Image: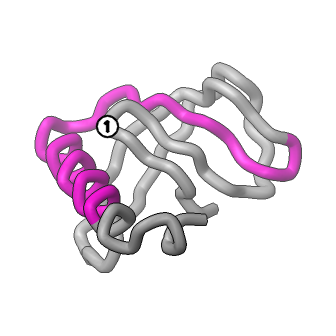
């Protein structure tokens, strides 16, 4: 799957795989161009049939949480620089 939205508390993952709400999944993902992987368990909080799932991170390390916070801030800064035409 592909992460479409991320915060320090969770993410929306675009996937065709089906998981029930309350399922615990193990995630491994990179942020942007980084080769360093973030690994954590997450609980499925909501699902979209054939479209994806919203998860809440359960055991994210403080280091990984900091990396995600930095990544989110960088993405927000890029969107601000691009202005309305750069948003989708």
- Residue 66, magenta (yes or no): yes
Q: Is residue 44 above or below residue 67?
A: above
Q: Position of residue 77 (x, y in %)?
A: 26, 61
> Element under label 1?
loop
Q: How was this image coloured?
A: one colour
User: Which residue has dot 1 on it?
Assistant: 8
Question: x%, y% of residue 39?
Answer: 33, 50
- On screen, residue 31 above or below 23: below
What residue sits 56% from the left and 57% below the top? 4
Taking the magenta stretch, the answer to whether it contains residue 53 is yes
Is residue 34 positioned above or below 1 on the image?
below
Segment colored magenta: 49-77
Dot 1: few (<14), some (14–19), or many (≥20) neighbours within 10 Å? some
Q: Quadrant of residue 19?
A: top right
- Foreground of the two, 28 or 76: 76
Q: Is residue 11 left or right of residue 21?
A: left
Locate the N terminus and report the quarter of the image it occupies.
Answer: bottom right
User: In front here: 16 or 25?
Assistant: 16
Q: Nearer the viewer, residue 7 or 60?
A: 7
Q: Residue at x 33, y 62 (%)?
A: 80
Seen at 72% across and 48% down, the residue is: 52
Query: For the C terminus, which image quadrant?
Result: bottom right
Would residue 30 be visible to someone looking at this image? no
Residue 57 in sight from this viewpoint: yes
Instruction: Report the residue that reaches farthest toward the top.
Output: 22
Q: Is residue 10 above or below residue 27?
A: above
In the rendered image, residue 56, in percent from the top left (x then y), is placed at 48, 29
In percent of width and height, residue 50 lies at: 86, 51
């Amino acid at each position: 799957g592909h992460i479409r939205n991320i915060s320090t508390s969770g993410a929306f993952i675009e996937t065709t795989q089906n998981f029930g709400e309350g399922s615990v999944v193990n995630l491994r993902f990179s942020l942007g161009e980084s080769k360093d992987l973030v690994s954590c368990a997450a609980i499925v909080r909501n699902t979209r049939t054939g479209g994806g799932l919203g998860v809440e991170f359960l055991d994210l390390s403080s280091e990984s949480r900091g990396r995600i916070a930095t990544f989110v801030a960088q993405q927000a800064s890029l969107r601000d620089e691009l202005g309305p035409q750069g948003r989708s």
